Amino acid sequence: MLRAVNVSEHISEQEAWQRVMDHAGTVDTVPPQLDWFRAAHDCVSRLGRERFAQLLTAWLAAIARPGAVALTRAESRHLIGLLYCGVLVHDEAVERALLNLVEIRWEPRDARLLVQSAVAWAVSQLSPETTWTPLAELRHQLAMRQPDDPAAILKNEQAMDAPPASSYLQ
């Protein structure tokens, strides 16, 4: 389901993007621990913040379409990891791409819970002027999608209230 983005023909850029993708696939908590963010920061820096933002925006645009999006477990881990990497670059195009993910219904259920929590956290990291309405809408949507699953609602709320990414790198 998730397609690769066109990385330049330069071997160094291909290797740097692959390093980001490999690291993104190692994420195992919502949000990740400090060491994970530090390593992510290093991976993004090797590629270059601007180039990473361009590639991430293209990658997210390829999957951000209305309706349901089916993900394998590995794809959901990569998506989640890339979302966390994305909040490190403070790029307007990346922020818009993250906000577009709010409307997507992720499938299957286990991927949905993980990805929704990651999207909630990533959106909560954006500037308040950009996110107040989408974040309020996201809280409402997540609650409506899982009215019989209080644990999932609590997990999403905790993700949105987690410390900002910038605090992990100070």
Image: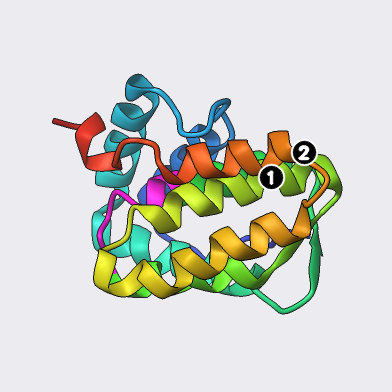
Amino acid type at image mark 2: Arg
Left or right: where 133 falls relative to 41 = right
- In this view, the residue in front, 41 or 84, is 84
Looking at the rendered image, the quarter that the N terminus falls into is bottom right
In this orientation, does residue 98 appear?
no
> Which quadrant holds residue 53?
bottom left
Q: Report the residue that reaches farthest toward the left.
A: 170
Question: Which residue is rendered at x = 53% and y = 43% of the image?
Answer: 157
Question: Which residue is rendered at x = 72% and y = 79% of the image?
Answer: 66
Give the residue at mark 2: 73
Q: Residues within 10 Å of mark 1 (few under 14, many from 20)?
A: many
Left or right: where 93 falls relative to 139 = left
Magenta span: chief secondary structure: loop
| C-alpha span from label 1 to label 2 | 5 Å
> Which quadrant holds residue 73?
top right
Question: Which residue is rendered at x = 76% and y = 44% of the image?
Answer: 111
Residue 88 colored in magenta in the image: yes
In this picture, is 50 found above or below 158? below
Looking at the rendered image, the quarter that the C terminus falls into is top left
Q: Position of residue 29 (x, y in %)?
A: 54, 27
Query: Which SS class for mark 2?
Result: helix
In this orientation, does residue 146 appear?
yes
Label at residue 2: none
In this picture, is 107 found above or below 102? above
Residue 108 colored in magenta in the image: no
- Verify CB contact (< 8 Å) between mark 1 and mark 2: yes
Question: Which residue is rendered at x = 25% and y = 30% of the image?
Answer: 168
Amino acid type at image mark 1: Ser
Give the residue at mark 1: 76
Q: Position of residue 17 (x, y in %)?
A: 45, 49
Q: Position of residue 30 (x, y in %)?
A: 52, 33
* Range of residues picked out in magenta: 84-91
